[in-house]
């Protein structure tokens, strides 16, 4: 039996654990957070490839049961007058579900069959002829046959194996924030823009969703107070009902702020260590992250099973099959689309949503990108 350590318990990690335990591997999942993170933004799946993998996992019906349902969102001016409507099928894909609900579902399916270690993190990885010696912040050292980094764009496993984040992660000029807020903001999903800034309430991503242009910022990603202060500065003087929204942000204890960035790495594996999901393919907020994670987990696990745990063969085949498919993450950047840099760009974006022809073309392109891989039956 091959012994595998997975870093990260959001979506990619538990999806991989699902398949590996089914194939007879012994799996441990380590997660820095003390518990599963509930709620969070909505994530979506697009096209038949994503749905096929969910079906083969045996969770498609559960995802449908928990789906939030694509909701139209109105783009408004400073006076609240409607300018255009973003259709639910554009933002929500074929299936939309809260990230926390999906993570909980995957955890429930995998926890009886593998070990989860919360509130801990890897501190070193040392490869030997017989495996990878791993030390942790809290847990006693262990040796594993393989280690998989499914720990997001700020991947600890990637840093320890390949080098510093600055060598592989490129800032794309924008930040986004997801905030749970209270207060009555009308219930109707609405979005407002000023050049380089966007604020939305009631939409598919979070109760309050922000995107703004910015040079790289220095802050503690685990310090909610710092993130609130950065948001307050970024949205100072913005019109519409933004001042009321920012007051609600100041009362919130649930703030997630991160850059829209892109991972550029010339290989997904090194020795006995491989990358999965945002750790390897990047996060451009283009709506493909969760689909890439579950399809990538399916392919990686399937190849490991086919190769009977021979990581040299399996990692090479995973790379060969998946890198062309993951190019959508490499080529995207939702920042200029969600927060256009000029009023002219804002008008052009809004006009696109008014054109049924252009919307249909964009939806077809999205489906093409999402299905641009032939998946094997393992």
Image (tube, grey):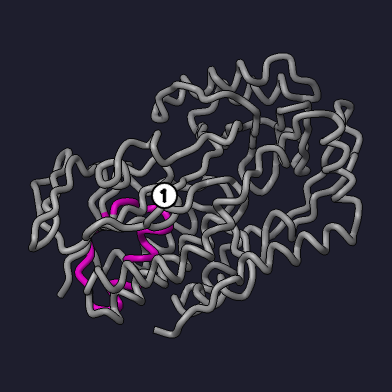
Residue 284, picture quadrant: top right
Above-or-below relation of 140 to 298:
above
Point out the image quarter for the N terminus. bottom left
Q: Residue at x 79, y 55 (%)?
A: 87
Measuring from the top left, give residue 262's x and y in whole percent. Answer: 51, 43
Q: Position of residue 140 (x, y in %)?
A: 8, 46
Foreground residue, 245 or 74?
A: 74
Residue at image coords 58%, 36%: 172
Instruction: Give left or right: position of 208 versus 167.
Output: right
Q: Which residue is mark 1?
A: 265
Q: How many marks?
A: 1
What is the quadrant of residue 241 in the picture? top right
User: Is 1 covered by the magenta stretch?
Assistant: no
Residue 311 image position (x, y, % from top left): 24, 69
- Residue 292 located left or right of residue 306: right
Relative to the observer, which residue lies in front, 213 or 67? Answer: 213
Residue placed farthest to the bottom in the image?
Answer: 377
Q: Is residue 68 left or right of residue 138?
A: right
> Residue 166's image quarter?
top left
Classify 233 as above or below 252. Answer: above
Q: Viewer-proximal residue, 290 or 161?
A: 161
Which residue of the protein is positioned furthest toward the front in this rendering? 266
The answer to whether residue 180 of the structure is visible from this angle is: no
Percent x, y of residue 278: 45, 51
Residue 294 visible in rendering: yes
Q: Which secondary structure lies at badge 1?
A: loop
Name the residue at 74% across, 54% down.
Answer: 71
What are the residue bounds of the magenta stretch? 7-29
Q: Is residue 14 magenta?
A: yes
């Amino acid at each position: 039996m091959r012994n595998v350590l997975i870093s990260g318990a959001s979506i990619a990690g538990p999806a991989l654990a699902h398949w590996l335990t089914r194939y007879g591997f012994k799996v441990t999942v380590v997660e820095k957070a003390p518990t599963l993170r509930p709620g969070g933004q909505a994530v979506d799946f697009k096209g038949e490839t994503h749905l096929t993998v969910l079906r083969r996992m045996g969770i498609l019906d559960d995802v449908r049961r928990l789906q939030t349902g694509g909701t139209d969102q109105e783009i408004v001016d400073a006076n609240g007058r409607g300018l255009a409507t973003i259709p639910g099928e554009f933002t929500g894909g074929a299936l939309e579900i809260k990230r926390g609900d999906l993570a909980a579902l995957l955890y429930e399916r995998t926890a009886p069959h593998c070990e989860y270690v919360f509130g801990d993190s890897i501190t070193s990885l040392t490869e030997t002829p017989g495996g990878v010696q791993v030390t942790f912040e809290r847990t006693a050292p262990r040796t594993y046959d393989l280690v998989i980094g499914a720990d997001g764009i700020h991947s600890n496993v990637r840093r320890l194996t390949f080098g510093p984040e600055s060598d592989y992660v490129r800032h794309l000029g924008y930040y986004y924030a997801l905030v749970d807020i209270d207060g009555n903001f009308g219930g109707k999903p609405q979005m407002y823009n000023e050049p380089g800034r966007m604020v939305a309430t009631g939409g598919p991503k979070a109760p309050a969703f922000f995107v703004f242009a910015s040079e790289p910022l220095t802050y503690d990603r685990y310090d909610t107070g710092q993130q609130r202060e950065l948001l307050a500065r970024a949205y100072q003087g913005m019109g519409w009902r933004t001042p009321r929204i920012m007051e609600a942000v100041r009362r919130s204890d649930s703030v997630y702020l991160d850059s829209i960035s892109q991972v550029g790495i010339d290989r997904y594996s090194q020795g006995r260590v491989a990358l999965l999901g945002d750790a390897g393919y990047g996060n451009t907020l283009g709506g493909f992250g969760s689909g890439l994670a579950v399809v990538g987990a399916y392919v990686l696990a399937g190849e490991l099973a086919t190769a009977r745990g021979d990581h040299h063969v399996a990692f090479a085949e995973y790379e060969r099959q998946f890198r062309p498919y993951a190019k959508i993450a490499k080529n995207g950047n939702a920042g200029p689309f969600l927060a256009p840099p000029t009023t002219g760009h804002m008008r052009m974006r809004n006009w696109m949503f008014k054109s049924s022809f252009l919307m249909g073309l964009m939806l077809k392109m999205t489906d093409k990108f999402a299905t641009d891989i032939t998946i094997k039956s393992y």
